[in-house]
Amino acid sequence: MTTTVYNLIGVEVAQLPEPGIADRIKPRLVHSAAATDQELMAALRTGDHTAFAELANRYFAQAYRVAWRVLGGPADAEDLAQEAFIKLWQAPHSLRDGAAVRSWLMRVVTNLAIDRKRRKQLQTFDSVPDIAEERPTPEDDLSRDQVANEVDAAISRLPDRQRVALVLTYFEGMTNQQTAQIMDLSVDAVESLLSRARRNLKSQLAERWRYMLDELARQ
Protein backbone atom coordinates (compact mmCIF):
# COMPACT_ATOMS: atom_id res chain seq x y z
CA MET A 1 0.00 0.00 0.00
CA THR A 2 1.00 3.62 -0.39
CA THR A 3 0.17 6.78 1.47
CA THR A 4 0.08 10.24 -0.07
CA VAL A 5 2.01 13.19 1.32
CA TYR A 6 0.55 16.64 0.66
CA ASN A 7 2.18 20.03 0.82
CA LEU A 8 0.67 23.08 2.48
CA ILE A 9 -1.76 23.87 -0.30
CA GLY A 10 -3.08 20.32 -0.62
CA VAL A 11 -1.24 19.33 -3.79
CA GLU A 12 0.07 15.79 -3.99
CA VAL A 13 3.86 15.76 -3.96
CA ALA A 14 4.84 12.12 -3.62
CA GLN A 15 3.68 8.55 -3.21
CA LEU A 16 5.42 7.02 -0.23
CA PRO A 17 5.50 3.45 1.07
CA GLU A 18 3.22 2.70 3.96
CA PRO A 19 5.39 2.51 7.10
CA GLY A 20 5.98 -0.98 8.43
CA ILE A 21 5.90 -2.13 12.04
CA ALA A 22 9.53 -1.11 12.62
CA ASP A 23 8.82 2.37 11.32
CA ARG A 24 5.76 2.77 13.48
CA ILE A 25 7.69 2.31 16.69
CA LYS A 26 10.40 4.83 15.75
CA PRO A 27 10.31 7.98 17.90
CA ARG A 28 8.56 10.86 16.15
CA LEU A 29 8.90 14.59 16.72
CA VAL A 30 6.10 15.48 19.09
CA HIS A 31 6.70 19.25 19.08
CA SER A 32 8.01 19.73 15.56
CA ALA A 33 7.24 23.45 15.56
CA ALA A 34 9.79 23.89 18.34
CA ALA A 35 12.42 21.70 16.67
CA THR A 36 15.44 23.19 14.94
CA ASP A 37 15.95 22.80 11.22
CA GLN A 38 18.81 20.41 11.95
CA GLU A 39 16.56 18.23 14.12
CA LEU A 40 13.86 18.25 11.46
CA MET A 41 16.33 17.25 8.75
CA ALA A 42 17.64 14.40 10.92
CA ALA A 43 14.07 13.17 11.29
CA LEU A 44 13.34 13.65 7.60
CA ARG A 45 16.24 11.36 6.71
CA THR A 46 14.39 8.60 8.54
CA GLY A 47 11.26 9.24 6.48
CA ASP A 48 9.42 11.31 9.08
CA HIS A 49 6.38 12.86 7.38
CA THR A 50 5.79 15.27 10.27
CA ALA A 51 9.28 16.71 9.91
CA PHE A 52 8.71 17.26 6.20
CA ALA A 53 5.38 18.97 6.86
CA GLU A 54 6.97 21.30 9.40
CA LEU A 55 9.78 22.27 6.99
CA ALA A 56 7.13 22.99 4.36
CA ASN A 57 5.21 25.05 6.91
CA ARG A 58 8.33 27.12 7.58
CA TYR A 59 9.67 27.66 4.09
CA PHE A 60 7.10 26.93 1.37
CA ALA A 61 5.73 30.49 1.36
CA GLN A 62 9.22 31.95 1.07
CA ALA A 63 10.15 29.53 -1.72
CA TYR A 64 6.99 30.59 -3.55
CA ARG A 65 7.78 34.30 -3.15
CA VAL A 66 11.33 33.86 -4.41
CA ALA A 67 10.12 31.88 -7.44
CA TRP A 68 7.45 34.54 -8.10
CA ARG A 69 10.00 37.37 -8.05
CA VAL A 70 12.63 35.59 -10.12
CA LEU A 71 10.06 34.53 -12.71
CA GLY A 72 8.53 38.00 -12.79
CA GLY A 73 5.02 36.79 -12.00
CA PRO A 74 2.95 34.07 -10.32
CA ALA A 75 2.80 31.69 -13.30
CA ASP A 76 4.69 28.48 -12.44
CA ALA A 77 5.88 29.84 -9.07
CA GLU A 78 3.79 27.35 -7.11
CA ASP A 79 4.96 24.45 -9.28
CA LEU A 80 8.61 25.38 -8.78
CA ALA A 81 8.23 25.75 -5.02
CA GLN A 82 6.63 22.31 -4.92
CA GLU A 83 9.42 20.89 -7.07
CA ALA A 84 12.04 22.19 -4.64
CA PHE A 85 10.31 20.43 -1.75
CA ILE A 86 9.94 17.23 -3.75
CA LYS A 87 13.70 17.29 -4.27
CA LEU A 88 14.17 17.74 -0.54
CA TRP A 89 11.89 14.79 0.24
CA GLN A 90 13.51 12.53 -2.36
CA ALA A 91 17.13 13.31 -1.46
CA PRO A 92 17.42 14.59 2.13
CA HIS A 93 20.84 12.97 2.47
CA SER A 94 22.23 15.31 -0.20
CA LEU A 95 21.98 18.11 2.36
CA ARG A 96 24.78 17.44 4.83
CA ASP A 97 24.18 20.43 7.10
CA GLY A 98 20.58 20.32 8.27
CA ALA A 99 20.85 23.84 9.63
CA ALA A 100 21.31 25.10 6.06
CA VAL A 101 18.00 23.73 4.75
CA ARG A 102 16.54 27.18 4.05
CA SER A 103 19.57 28.22 2.01
CA TRP A 104 19.45 24.90 0.15
CA LEU A 105 15.77 25.32 -0.71
CA MET A 106 16.24 28.92 -1.87
CA ARG A 107 19.17 27.88 -4.05
CA VAL A 108 17.14 25.08 -5.63
CA VAL A 109 14.09 27.26 -6.27
CA THR A 110 16.12 30.15 -7.72
CA ASN A 111 17.95 27.79 -10.09
CA LEU A 112 14.65 26.21 -11.15
CA ALA A 113 13.11 29.64 -11.71
CA ILE A 114 16.06 30.90 -13.75
CA ASP A 115 15.96 27.79 -15.94
CA ARG A 116 12.20 28.10 -16.44
CA LYS A 117 12.44 31.81 -17.29
CA ARG A 118 15.22 31.19 -19.83
CA ARG A 119 13.24 28.43 -21.54
CA LYS A 120 10.19 30.66 -21.81
CA GLN A 121 12.25 33.52 -23.21
CA LEU A 122 13.66 31.24 -25.88
CA GLN A 123 10.18 29.98 -26.78
CA THR A 124 8.60 33.44 -27.03
CA PHE A 125 11.45 35.63 -28.24
CA ASP A 126 10.39 35.61 -31.91
CA SER A 127 6.66 35.71 -31.30
CA VAL A 128 6.23 38.61 -28.87
CA PRO A 129 6.03 42.10 -30.46
CA ASP A 130 7.81 45.06 -28.94
CA ILE A 131 5.47 47.10 -26.77
CA ALA A 132 6.14 50.73 -26.04
CA GLU A 133 6.34 51.41 -22.32
CA GLU A 134 4.20 54.09 -20.76
CA ARG A 135 5.97 55.64 -17.79
CA PRO A 136 4.10 57.84 -15.33
CA THR A 137 5.62 61.21 -14.55
CA PRO A 138 7.24 61.79 -11.14
CA GLU A 139 4.17 63.82 -10.15
CA ASP A 140 1.80 60.89 -10.63
CA ASP A 141 0.13 59.57 -7.51
CA LEU A 142 0.96 55.90 -7.96
CA SER A 143 -1.16 53.28 -6.27
CA ARG A 144 0.55 50.32 -4.68
CA ASP A 145 -0.61 48.08 -7.52
CA GLN A 146 0.94 50.42 -10.05
CA VAL A 147 4.14 50.55 -8.02
CA ALA A 148 4.26 46.77 -7.77
CA ASN A 149 3.66 46.28 -11.48
CA GLU A 150 6.30 48.77 -12.55
CA VAL A 151 8.93 47.51 -10.10
CA ASP A 152 8.22 43.88 -10.99
CA ALA A 153 8.60 44.67 -14.68
CA ALA A 154 11.90 46.43 -14.04
CA ILE A 155 13.21 43.59 -11.86
CA SER A 156 12.25 41.02 -14.48
CA ARG A 157 14.48 42.83 -16.98
CA LEU A 158 17.55 42.58 -14.76
CA PRO A 159 20.21 39.97 -15.57
CA ASP A 160 19.55 36.70 -13.74
CA ARG A 161 22.15 36.98 -11.00
CA GLN A 162 21.36 40.63 -10.28
CA ARG A 163 17.67 39.77 -10.01
CA VAL A 164 18.28 36.85 -7.63
CA ALA A 165 20.61 38.89 -5.40
CA LEU A 166 18.07 41.71 -5.19
CA VAL A 167 15.14 39.40 -4.47
CA LEU A 168 16.94 37.55 -1.68
CA THR A 169 18.40 40.58 0.09
CA TYR A 170 15.79 43.27 -0.43
CA PHE A 171 12.51 41.37 -0.55
CA GLU A 172 13.40 38.36 1.61
CA GLY A 173 15.50 40.30 4.11
CA MET A 174 18.55 38.07 3.90
CA THR A 175 22.00 39.35 4.74
CA ASN A 176 24.64 39.63 2.04
CA GLN A 177 26.38 36.67 3.62
CA GLN A 178 23.24 34.51 3.46
CA THR A 179 22.65 35.53 -0.14
CA ALA A 180 26.26 34.71 -0.97
CA GLN A 181 25.80 31.23 0.51
CA ILE A 182 22.64 30.59 -1.50
CA MET A 183 24.19 31.85 -4.74
CA ASP A 184 27.54 30.16 -4.07
CA LEU A 185 29.39 33.47 -4.41
CA SER A 186 31.62 35.62 -2.27
CA VAL A 187 30.09 38.46 -0.25
CA ASP A 188 32.02 40.93 -2.41
CA ALA A 189 30.48 39.42 -5.54
CA VAL A 190 26.98 39.75 -4.06
CA GLU A 191 27.61 43.37 -3.12
CA SER A 192 28.77 44.03 -6.68
CA LEU A 193 25.62 42.41 -8.08
CA LEU A 194 23.43 44.49 -5.78
CA SER A 195 25.21 47.67 -6.77
CA ARG A 196 24.71 46.93 -10.46
CA ALA A 197 21.08 45.94 -9.87
CA ARG A 198 20.39 49.24 -8.12
CA ARG A 199 22.02 51.19 -10.94
CA ASN A 200 19.96 49.31 -13.51
CA LEU A 201 16.75 49.90 -11.61
CA LYS A 202 17.55 53.56 -11.11
CA SER A 203 18.11 53.87 -14.84
CA GLN A 204 14.82 52.14 -15.64
CA LEU A 205 12.70 53.88 -13.03
CA ALA A 206 14.29 57.32 -13.23
CA GLU A 207 14.19 59.30 -9.99
CA ARG A 208 11.38 57.31 -8.38
CA TRP A 209 13.21 53.98 -8.01
CA ARG A 210 14.07 54.19 -4.29
CA TYR A 211 10.59 55.38 -3.31
CA MET A 212 9.01 52.62 -5.37
CA LEU A 213 11.16 49.86 -3.86
CA ASP A 214 10.47 51.13 -0.34
CA GLU A 215 6.74 51.34 -1.05
CA LEU A 216 6.66 47.81 -2.42
CA ALA A 217 8.68 46.39 0.48
CA ARG A 218 6.08 47.76 2.93
CA GLN A 219 3.28 45.72 1.34
Image (spheres, rainbow, N blue to C red):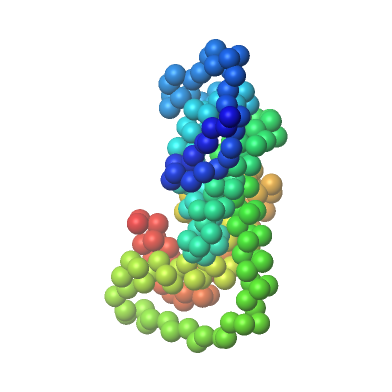
Which residue is nearer to you in this view: 131 or 165?
131
Residue 128 in view of the camera: yes
Tally of numbered discs: 0
Q: Where does the image place residue 163, in percent across and percent down from the top left?
A: 58, 61
Which residue is nearer to you in this view: 17 or 83?
17
203 lies above or below 160: below
- Left or right of 47 on screen, residue 141: left
Q: Quadrant of residue 13?
A: top right
Residue found 47% across the figure and 61% down from its top? 74
The quadrant of the picture occupied by the C terminus is bottom left
69 lies above or below 145: above
The quadrant of the picture occupied by the N terminus is top right
Residue found 31% across the figure and 70% down from its top? 143
Residue found 46% across the figure and 24% down from its top? 32
58 lies above or below 167: above
Q: Where does the image place residue 133, in percent across and percent down from the top left?
A: 48, 83
Residue 196 in view of the camera: no
Residue found 65% across the figure and 37% down from its top? 90
